[in-house]
Amino acid sequence: MIDLLGIEPRDAQRRNHSMEEAGQKLKRARERLNLRYRDVEEASNQIAARHNNDEFVIALSRLSDIENKGTVPTIYRLYSLCTIYRLDVNEVLDWYGVNVATLAADAASIQM
C-alpha cells in the first residue's frame, strides 16, 4: 500500500525487500546447479505430469518474476522449486517469512 505521498510504509517496504531477497536466494540455488530457466521449466513439467496437475509448472516468465521481481510462488511452484533445487521446503518458507517452527504455538494461541 502506498500513502498519499507515494511512499510505501516501512512494513510493506520490508516485506517487498524480503520477497526479493528470497527470489535472489532461489536464483543463487539455480545458478549453483548450473540450471537454465528452460531446465527448470522442463523439470517442473515432469513434476506436473507426475502429479497430473499443471499448477506445478513454472513457466520461464514466472521464474524470472520470482527471482527478479519478488513474486511469491504458489505452494505448487514452491514445491517444484524445492524439488528441483533439492532445497528444504521449511527453509525456503522461512525465506518468505513463514516460520513453520511456530505453527504449533500459533495454533495453541487461537481461541475458538
Image (cartoon, helix red, strand yellow):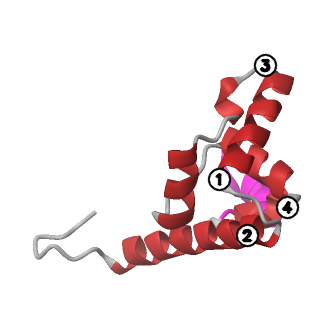
| Left or right, residue 95 beside residue 11 | right
Q: From mark 3 to mark 2, how far is it between C-alphas?
A: 28 Å
User: In x, y percent, where is residue 61?
Assistant: 50, 47
How many residues crowd mark 4 within 10 Å: few (<14), some (14–19), many (20+)? some
Q: Earlier in the sequence, mark 3 or mark 4?
A: 3
Query: What's the CA distance linking mark 1 and mark 4?
Result: 17 Å
For disc 2, the marked residue is 31
Closer to the eye: label 3 or 1: 1
Quarter the N terminus occupies: bottom left
* SS assignment at label 1: helix
For marks 1 and 4, the one nearer the N-term is 1
Residue range highlighted in magenta:
98-112
Q: Earlier in the sequence, mark 3 or mark 1?
A: 1
Few, some or many residues within 10 Å of mark 2 (<14, 14–19, 20+): few
Q: Vertically, is 96 above or below 107?
A: below
Residue at x-position 11% and y-position 76%: 5
Q: Tell me the residue that label 3 is attached to.
A: 52
Q: Main secondary structure of the magenta part?
A: helix
